[in-house]
Each structure stands twice: as C-alpha cells, then as structure tokens.
Image: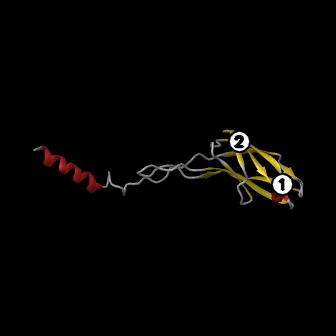
Amino acid sequence: MKLPYVLGMIALCLGCGGYGPSSNMPPAPGTVPVIAQLSPEETSAGSPGFILTINGSSFANNAFVNWNGTHPTTMVLTAKQLTAKIPAAAIATSGTVAVTVTNPGTPGGAYGGGTVDETSKPKSFTIK
C-alpha cells in the first residue's frame, strides 16, 4: 500500500521540475563596492610607478582594481581599504583614468545560485 504512494510522490516531484536539474536558480546580486577616496588623486605624466590607496566600503577579500582596462596587482587591506600597484607605463601620458573596484561573484551550488560580479562607480584619477 505504501509503495504506490511513494512512487506517486516521486513521479509528482520529478514531473513538476521541483527537484530536477532544470530548476537552477539564477545568481543573486553581489555586494557593490564603493570608492570614497583615491590617494593620491593625481600624478605627473612620466613619473615612476606608485602605490594607489583606495578608501571606501564593501571591498571583498578578493576585490580587484580596474585601471584603464587593466587589473594592476591589488592588495586588500580591509573591507574599507585596498592598494594597487600602478606601473610607470600606466602614467606615461597625461589624461584622466577611471578607477573602479570589482567584487568577484561567488559560484553557485549544484542547483545554481551564487552571486554576480559587482563593480563600483568610477572615480577619476588625473595624470598631469
């Protein structure tokens, strides 16, 4: 008597897609980092490379800096401060560079989930 009931419940669950592999959840939004200040805020073209300090909030422990389409070596000090090693070649000519910070997303499990990458609003760095 119990066997038909159990088989019926299994068929119902599988038929509804509630427990099958097709019920993947999409990634959730991640944590958006915020840049409050760059230090220094500017440099002169042709100067030697330097360490850029970025103060803000919500920096993940694996966050990275985006500098003019590149990802310089980044070190996360705290959730409110990180540094990036900017090479001399990146400041060879004058102009303005948009600096952002990205928190990488987290992978989902067997049924999807996880979070997506989130990037801060840009902060301008001036090369004189």
Horizontal placement of 70 versus 15: left or right? right
Q: Residue at x 31, y 55 (%)?
A: 17
* Label 1: few (<14), some (14–19) or many (≥20) C-alpha neighbours in 10 Å: some
Check disc 1 and report the residue beneath it.
126
Q: Helix, strand or loop at disc 2?
A: strand
Q: Residue at x 86, y 60 (%)?
A: 92
Numbered mark located on residue 56 in the image = 2
For the residues marked 1 and 2, what is the alpha-carbon distance in whole angstroms?
19 Å
Residue 4 pos. (x, y %): 13, 49
Q: How many marks?
A: 2
**For residue 36, what is the image quadrant?**
top right
Residue 81 pos. (x, y %): 72, 40
Horizontal placement of 67 versus 60: left or right? right
Tell me if residue 101 comes above or below residue 93 in the rendering.
Answer: above
Q: Residue at x 27, y 54 (%)?
A: 14
Residue 119 pos. (x, y %): 64, 52
Check contact, mark 1 vs mark 2: CB within 8 A: no
Tell me if residue 67 comes above or below residue 55 in the rendering.
Answer: below
**For residue 1, what is the image quadrant?**
top left
* Display coloring: secondary structure
Residue 9 pos. (x, y %): 21, 49
Q: Residue at x 80, y 53 (%)?
A: 125
Q: Amino acid at mark 2?
A: Gly
Q: Amino acid at mark 1?
A: Thr
Tell me if residue 124 comes above or below residue 57 in the rendering.
Answer: below
Q: Helix, strand or loop at disc 1?
A: strand
Horizontal placement of 119 versus 85: left or right? left
Q: Quadrant of the C terminus?
A: bottom right
Lower position in the chain sequence, tag 1 or tag 2: 2
* Label 2: few (<14), some (14–19) or many (≥20) C-alpha neighbours in 10 Å: some
